[in-house]
Amino acid sequence: MTHILHIDASARPGIAGTDNHGSHSRHLTYRFVSQWQSGRPQDTVTYRDIGQNPPSIINHDWIASAFTPEERLEPWMKEALAESDQLVDELVAADILVIGTPLYNFGMPAALKAWVDQVVRAGRTVEIDESNPTDPYIPKLNDRPRHAVILTARGGVNMSPGEEMAHMNHLETHLATALQFMGITRIHYVAIEGQEVGGEVLAASIANALHKIEALVDELQTAVGVAPIPVPA
């Protein structure tokens, strides 16, 4: 069986097209996961709505605890890391990570950044080789093929890599850096653009994104059923 970790980061609780002021990124994740489960009902899903229930922001106690060897952790340190441990365990268990997120002010929402800070952990998702001061980081989540599906919604247009407004979009690149740092290198992207423009521009972008999701689900389900999923070019 394949296990999916489904994360929604939008501050909007509803789904676009169904609820007033609903979220386009939630629409995309809902479509991906529901189509996946329709084709592979035996697979399992863990859902975490960080848009409505944001992870804690890391603080001094977290930092002191995260960089203390496990055998020296005091009770208060274990408590400080309890939430992080749960979030890391969910990520480690996932074969496919599905993240739905809007682009807020050039980057990821604060809730998603808090999640990233909780799961990028020395000793859990990355090792540190102190003998190599130039490049000491060793990813731990490359022990088996894991995939990340990043489903985003942007108010503007022409913000994909290579396009004229790409310099204002740091969302996907930031996420990719964090995921690859931990060892998740098979990353797939689908985006909706034009929410602020609306009209035909937004409608066409939604239709295109839904078509890409349908094709991506088919591709990944075919691959997990017969062979390791190929790394995207």
Image: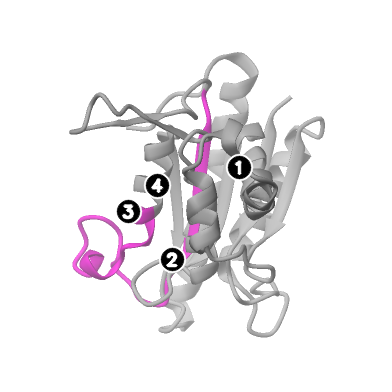
Q: What residue type is disc 3 on?
A: Thr
Pointer 3 residue? 173
Give the mark toward the camera: 4 or 3.
4
Q: Earlier in the sequence, mark 2 or mark 3?
A: 2
Examine the image and state in which quarter residue 134 appears. Answer: top left
Observer-nearest of 51 and 79: 79
Q: Earlier in the sequence, mark 4 or mark 2?
A: 2
Q: Position of residue 110 (x, y in %)?
A: 49, 70
Pointer 1 residue? 88
Give the mark toward the camera: 4 or 1.
1
Q: Residues within 10 Å of mark 4 (few under 14, many from 20)?
A: some
- Taking the magenta stretch, the answer to whether it contains residue 164 is yes
Residues under labels 2 and 1: Cα distance? 19 Å
Q: Position of residue 25 (x, y in %)?
A: 56, 64
Pointer 2 residue? 108
Question: In the rendered view, would you say 225 is above or below 168?
Answer: above
Q: What is the residue that sits farthest to the top in this orientation?
A: 227
Pointer 4 residue? 178
Residues under labels 1 and 3: Cα distance? 21 Å
Q: Which residues are magenta?
A: 145-174
Indicate the quadrant containing the N terminus: top left, top right, bottom left or bottom right: top right
At 26% from the left and 70% from the top, the residue drawn is: 168
Examine the image and state in which quarter residue 171 appears. Answer: bottom left
Q: Earlier in the sequence, mark 2 or mark 1?
A: 1
Residues under labels 4 and 2: Cα distance? 12 Å
Q: What is the residue that sits farthest to the right in this orientation?
A: 42
